[in-house]
Amino acid sequence: MKLLITGGAGFIGSNFIRYWLNKYPLDTIVNLDALTYAGNLENLKEIEENKNYKFIKGDICDADLVNKLVKGIDLIAHFAAETHVDRSVMGSSDFVRTNIKGTMVLLDAAKNNDNIRFHHVSTDEVFGSLDSNDSAFNERTPYAPRNPYSASKAASDHLVRAYFHTHKLPITISNCSNNFGPYQFPEKFFPLFITNLIEGKKVPVYGEGKNIRDWIYVDDHNAGVDAIIKKGKIGETYCLGGETELQNIDITKKILELMGKSGEMIEYVKDRPGHDFRYAMDITKAKNELGWEPEVSFEDGLKKTIEWYKNNEEWWRNIKSGKYQDYYKKQYSHELKK
Ligand code: NAD
Ligand code: DAU
């Protein structure tokens, strides 16, 4: 198979490319990524010489480029997005542009080139926020996004489904819960807290830390996407999650314990505006129809993640200092001048 991966220089996309080439070494991958602040080619260093892998720096909103790249492609796996909720609170426009318009450009290119198989990577946040006693989200839960990030992802899901009904585009969608693991950009909860503690800094817990997320190790998410690509029913949505609901404060205490730090390192800070209280996924459909389920326990995943950040200080220190972007300025200076 020849795959076009969008957003493959980000956290989940880069782990997906590594996962896929390891499992299906005869497949070829084209990775289209704009290298926004969240994209980092250091994430893919060990495969950049692989003859079945090619990186293209480009924007998914660039219809001419996308139309050229989809020629001969069997499957598009669409990971590219603006992904950080706090950034979407500061401004929505990049989110609307990339997450909605970019998805539309890809869908049109897939439609206009013999209806290429399209897998859309989405999030549990499109379903809104649960109270403590509510049942977990499932594939029939009505959409109720509550922040600009999740609203833009919800719009993209609707577009993907609309192309299935209107144009018979062979699509599938996955809505997954919160991921953690190696190569996650250190603005997100796990990598921010782990790297702050290595640096001797405090960890900023929003509000009282009572919000709940359902955590999944990134390789388990990617194995779920693989299962949908191989066995999923066209036109269907699959909910993926780790079946591990935890309060932020309990995770924080666990990270402190594993890193040998005291509770004094916790700093309670102003809450995120409109902070969704709880996400939880009912993954029965994916288990029954795909034979998929998460395999990495939270405890093991957390230990592996902490070890990875301890062993890859240069990777995250370059990001925190902004140095990682100098590399791209040099490498792509001709394009930046345009
Ligand atoms: P990320 O922010 O780490 O990476 C996003 C990647 O997309 C970056 O490499 C960036 O350069 C690229 N990108 C952004 N705008 C682009 C554009 N216009 N053109 C081309 N490339 C562009 O994100 P992530 O956490 O790896 O998330 C990947 C996908 O998974 C997203 O669609 C996200 O909504 C979804 N998702 C994430 C989680 C999570 O917990 N992180 C959970 C469920 C679903
Ligand atoms: O649920 C899936 C979503 O998970 C993805 O679609 C998003 O792309 C991804 O960013 C993530 O969204 P969250 O907002 O849940 O993740 P974040 O890592 O930003 O925050 C996780 C929880 O931790 C949330 O309740 C807010 C809290 N938090 C976060 C940060 C960055 C803190 O308490 N302090 C912090 O500094």
Image (cartoon, rainbow, N blue to C red):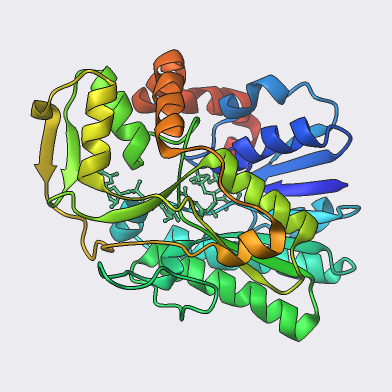
Query: In the picture provided, is 307 more to the left or to the right than 87?
Result: right
Figure quadrant of residue 300: top left
Q: How many marks?
A: 0
Q: Give me the residue at 31% from left, 53% from top.
A: 86
Q: In the rendering, at what x and y percent does residue 244 appear?
A: 40, 49
Quadrant containing the C terminus in the rendered view: top right
Taking 337 as reference, is 43 above or below it? above
From where the camera sits, is residue 35 visible? no
Query: In the picture provided, is 236 more to the left or to the right than 178?
Result: right
Q: Give me the residue at 80% from left, 48% from top.
A: 3
Taking 337 as reference, is 261 above or below it? above
Q: Give me the residue at 53% from left, 79% from top.
A: 140
Taking 309 as reference, is 169 above or below it? below
Taking 19 as reference, is 72 above or below it? below
Query: In the picture provided, is 175 more to the left or to the right than 272?
Result: right
Q: In the rendering, at what x and y percent does residue 24 appear?
A: 82, 37
Query: In the picture provided, is 219 more to the left or to the right than 216?
Result: right
Q: In the rendering, at what x and y percent does residue 26 appear?
A: 89, 34
Q: Give me the residue at 61% from left, 42% from top.
A: 13
Q: In the rendering, at what x and y percent does residue 273 appear?
A: 21, 62
Q: Seen from this angle, which residue lies furthest left?
A: 264
Residue closer to the observer: 243 or 215: 243
From where the camera sits, is residue 138 visible? yes
